[in-house]
Image (tube, rainbow, N blue to C red):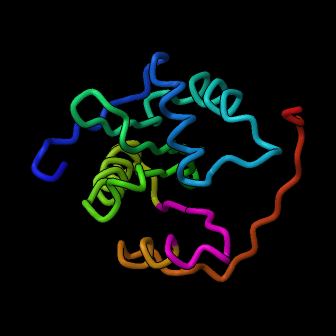
Amino acid sequence: MRGVTVKIRTYQEEDQSAVIALWQACGLVRPWNDPAKDIERKVSMQPELFFVGEREGRVMATAMAGYDGHRGSVYYLAVDPACQHQGLGRLLMATIEQKLHAMGCPKLNILVRTTNETVLAFYRKLGYPVDEAVSLGKRLIPDD
């Protein structure tokens, strides 16, 4: 698949099943998060920051970004396991950084599970050091 151009574009409704399958293949789906609901929520807020990377019409990568006026964030960065280490993740992150910068976003925060050393190494290579902060969370709407 090397040498074939990857197109980064915004998510479209017909991408849903391919996106969810990709997230499942990448181990991003959790029992407490319904991926279809996560997509629905993202499409209702800043849909222009929901990106899909496609190659020859096939969804190969995704990323959701957000900006609240103070900080940007990235979620669901996924690259098809068969296509990893080809620069798709870097391309998506560069696209997100460019879009958020154009919106006036001063800083981008990324949440990564502490046990995911591979992903932590990926972000460190892109210039994201570990912040001295703790992420706290509280579920307001259950997905069951």
Along the line of sight, the residue nearer the viewer: 2 or 16: 2
In the image, residue 120 sits, relative to residue 79, either above or below, namely below
Q: Give the magenta part as a residue range.
A: 107-119
Coordinates of residue 14 in the picture (x, y in percent)? 46, 16
* Residue ranking furthest to the left: 3
Q: Is residue 7 left or right of residue 52?
A: left
Along the line of sight, the residue nearer the viewer: 76 or 98: 76
- Please name the residue shown 82% across and 44% down the image: 32
Count the marks: 0
- Please name the residue shown 58% across and 53% down the image: 70
In the image, residue 49 sits, relative to residue 107, either above or below, namely above
- Please name the residue shown 45% across and 36% down the image: 49
Q: Is residue 29 left or right of residue 91?
A: right
Task: Locate the C terminus and report the quarter of the image it occupies.
Answer: top right
Along the line of sight, the residue nearer the viewer: 2 or 109: 2
Coordinates of residue 135 in the picture (x, y in percent)? 75, 67
Residue 91 part of the magenta-drawn span: no
Along the line of sight, the residue nearer the viewer: 101 or 141: 141
Coordinates of residue 125 in the picture (x, y in percent)? 36, 78
In the image, residue 73 sits, relative to residue 42, either above or below, namely below
Coordinates of residue 54 in the picture (x, y in percent)? 30, 35
- Please name the residue shown 56% across and 79% down the image: 117
